[in-house]
Image (spheres, helix red, strand yellow):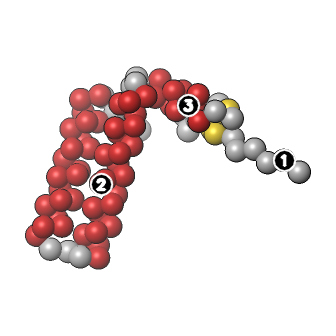
């Protein structure tokens, strides 16, 4: 038996065996380059991480880090016209 990993675009449902193809597809739907999409994904990941940290260790330092991560994410989204639809 052989197994294949298939990647699927979250926007249009296109399927491919190539991660890069789907990454390009998703970025194009958003009007971003692949590098910009990766930067956005990293900002979302950082915001999620710091939100998790605040939920377990809520203090001034962790709240400030979370607030900063959210501000950076919002700034990027506004700059690139990304909405939550």
- The spot of residue 28 in percent (x, y) is 47, 23
Q: Is residue 78 above or below residue 56?
A: above
Question: From the viewer's perspective, is the residue at label 3 or at label 2 nearer?
Answer: 3
- The spot of residue 26 in percent (x, y) is 51, 31
In the image, farthest residue toward the right: 1
SS type, badge 2 = helix
Q: Count neighbours of disc 3 (C-alpha within 10 A) and say few if under 14, some if 14 to 19, many if 20 or more.
A: few
* CB within 8 Å, label 3 to label 1: no
Which quadrant holds residue 25? top right
- The spot of residue 3 in percent (x, y) is 79, 48
Residue under label 2, please give it.
Answer: 47
Residue 29 in view here:
no
**In the image shown, does 4 or 12 lie closer to the viewer?**
4
Q: Going from the N terminus, do you reach mark 1 or mark 2 first?
A: 1
**In the image shown, does 34 or 52 lie closer to the viewer?**
34
Which quadrant holds residue 62? bottom left
Residue under label 3, please give it.
Answer: 20
Q: Going from the N terminus, do you reach mark 3 or mark 2 first?
A: 3
Q: Where, quadrant-wise, is the C terminus in this rendering?
A: top left
Q: Which residue: 31% across, 46% down?
A: 43
In the image, is 76 to the left or to the right of 60?
A: right
SS type, badge 1 = loop
């Amino acid at each position: 038996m052989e197994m294949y990993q298939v990647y699927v675009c979250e926007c249009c449902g296109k399927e491919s065996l190539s991660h890069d193809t789907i990454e390009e597809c998703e970025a194009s739907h958003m009007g971003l380059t692949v590098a910009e999409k990766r930067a956005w994904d990293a900002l979302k990941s950082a915001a999620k991480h710091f939100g998790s940290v605040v939920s377990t260790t809520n203090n001034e330092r962790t709240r400030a880090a979370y607030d900063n991560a959210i501000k950076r994410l919002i700034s990027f989204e506004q700059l690139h016209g990304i909405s939550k639809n």
